[in-house]
Image (cartoon, rainbow, N blue to C red):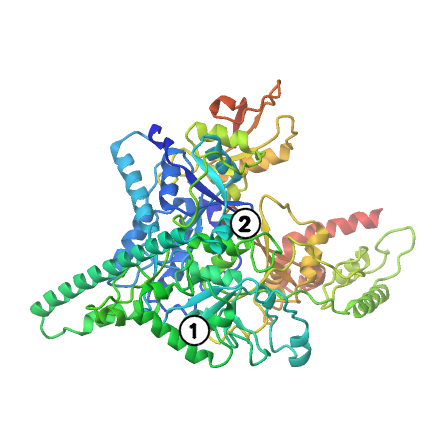
Amino acid sequence: MAASTERQIRISRVAGRYLVFDIDDVVHIRRHYGICAVLTGTMPQNPTQNLFLGLPVELHAEEARLLVDKGAGYIADELTDHLSQLSAMDTSTRKAYLQHLKQQRRNAQQVFDEEKAKVQAKHQGKRKAKPAAVAEPPAAVTEPEEDTSLFDTPKPAAPPLSAPPKEPSLPGVTPTTSSPLLPAPTPPSPVSIPRPANYPLYQYLNARGYYTTPGLRFGGDYSVYPGDPFRYHAHYLANSYGWDEEVAMLDLVASGRLGTAVKKSFLFGAEKPAEEGATGGGDKGGEGEVRVFCIEWAGM
Amino acid sequence: MPLDDDDNPALAPPAPHLSSPSPLPTDKTAAAAATDELTAEDLIEDEGAASQDFRAFAAALQFRKTAGVSAQTIRRGEKDFEAHGTRAQADALEQSRGAMRDVLSYTRVHSGGGKGNLARGWFFPGWWEGYREEEVEEGKEGEKKPFGFVRERVVVLEGSSVASQALGRAVTGQAKDRPARGRDWLLPEEALYLVERGSLDLWWPLKGLEELFPPDGTAEAVKEESEEDDEDDEVDEYDAGFPLSLQAAYALLIGEDGERGKISLQKFQVYSNLKRCGYNILRAPPTVNHPATKPATTTLWQWFASLLTTTPHHPPYGPLVRPGLYRSYASIYRQMALLPRHIPSATPTTTTPPTTHDPFTIHFHVWKSAQKWTKLRHPPPDFQLAVVDAQASSVPTGAEITALLGATPPAPGKPEWTGPGRIYARLKHGYRNVLVAVVDHGVINYMRFAEGTFGAEEVYGRFDFRGGGGRGGKKGGGRNNGGWGSVDCEMDG
């Protein structure tokens, strides 16, 4: 956890939503800050399914705020940053960006070439073994992939590859992040996030090592996992209330029964309002007293 | 985990018959069929996005190089109840994370090489800003051409891709000397969706549209340019502009609700979710203030009149069902019908025309995928969809849902749903219906609201056949006794 101090997560604010685009950032916050959030983007490798989704990751406001509070990330207003960079770009930045692009294109080309070589080697091996059926199987295998554009797969000898001697036209690349283009992070976070109402409960759960995902599936504010959701099922279905808020009995019954029905217990909590009015926005020290209860349906 | 499945977006109302969504015609991958199967079969086990096991996905991608992915290949990994501190558990977690990292660090590569299927889009946000799209299209050509949202279109497509069959729109009726004439322009959600799935290379232009797409002979100019790309150095290649990242695409194309040339993140998420499922989806055209209020009021009065004539006159006091000799239940029940019932009609029956307000208004029209669907000619939509944010809105009020339903065309159930056997199919389907997609930070739930027609289903009509031993009487038996009892009470009083 200590090693994480130097990495600054760029939290992109786009139209009031908080997104993370860098895969290293995503892995980092998942590992060190217990934030898994939700992958929302289409997978370019297999774009016709909804089971596995890709970047960007959408954060809750609470999660973004937590990262900022812990000094692990900063909020960047993507639209203004991009517009200012794109419309008035100085030559050095432009050069750097294009250089970066070219590098990526070269890498892509290299991967293509390697894959191609691998396939060829494989085919040659096959040819030796089975001289009769040479051309047929590879063609059948690679054909369907070509018309669907992109996978992480070898391309069947594409036209540009056929002319290797001169500098071939490199494949185009859409980078995931525009990091070389954007200015380096300014140390103090220029944009701050208003403290969300659910923040105390979220902070409380996060500080105790729980992972949360949006609770829409189970009808609460969060689904709470005892660890990384890769490994565990959610244990709780959590709702946040105000300290003096009256909670309707029927809500408790409804949520409690619902939680029990999906093998989770219903958790609800609230933060005790601070007496002095010192709403610590800092680290764990600023965490107020949070009380949490669980309800499970006994079925007597 | 019985309830988990109900909440799964892939199983939710847009796919009421799970077998129905067939793959997008443009995506004729070998695996597409398998993926569909997968949404139906494997998602039943799935608890949600959080339980993705990228190891399986990575394995499937490897596997895919040799054959299509079978539905069984991508399977959710087993999970534990809680941490027990073993190394096996830690390793499994580490592997999952590593697989996620590997899978997600993929870079989108466009290997068209200047020819073929390279689709390049240029970002020109201001081009159509002053364009006024009126009801010209509706007036002139009848219902032929759907509303184009030309003002919202911000990305011009260079070259044609498979996607342009279903997406984008060329703006017709332009003067000959206008640049980029006949080119397809993309809406922000279309462009972003294409960028995200790796089918479109979005470029930031350094030159004006006039230079990139000269007015006449556009075709030759583009051809020239693409050949240039092949031969010249990359210095010239980036002369006209340069490619944008996914991040930049999000920054430029996602905006607040109602911002011109942008789309809100929630709507985009719903859009791409449905696109990935293979549905065809278009923005719903703005509602036209149709002068249908007059017919509506007349039908209302007609309805009142018909109500008055059929209902028997009740004296101010005395028993509800007049004493007498009754030979059928129907005549008794008819006398007991005191409250006016809601009867759906083709035109809204409220005196004030319903106006929908922003969260609860039709945003998208959705079609099940079909071979003959095109962006310009398509049948009436299969579903009407509204997108709401889970945090920013609550359950719609009666007025909101009435207005929302009023904005949808009547969609009575299938004609073969007749007779007492299909009463619940009719009731469940309703007379009008609308889908509401609730988005909670990237997690989407689809809900279906329907205008029920309970008043039109006279259950008591069957009771009279009871003595005759018909099967209708047998079926309704348990319920009728209660009804009988209440009639008794009324008569006593």
**Circle 1: element type:** loop
Which residue, given by chain and number where applicable, does mark 2 sit on?
B439
**Circle 2: element type:** strand
Please provide percent x and percent y for residue B441. Answer: 51, 46
Q: Seen from this angle, which residue lies furthest left?
A: A128
Which residue, given by chain and number where applicable, does mark 1 sit on?
B160
| Front residue of B194 and B292 | B194
Q: Which mark is residue A189?
A: none
Counting the numbered discs, the total is 2
Q: Which residue is rendered at x = 78% and y = 50% of the image? A: B488
Q: Quadrant of the N terminus of chain A?
A: top left
Residue A212 in view (yes/no): no
| Front residue of B142 and B402 | B142
Q: Seen from this angle, which residue lies furthest right?
A: B316
Using residue B113 as the reference point, say whether residue B293 is left or right of it.
Answer: right
Verify CB contact (< 8 Å) between mark 1 and mark 2. Answer: no
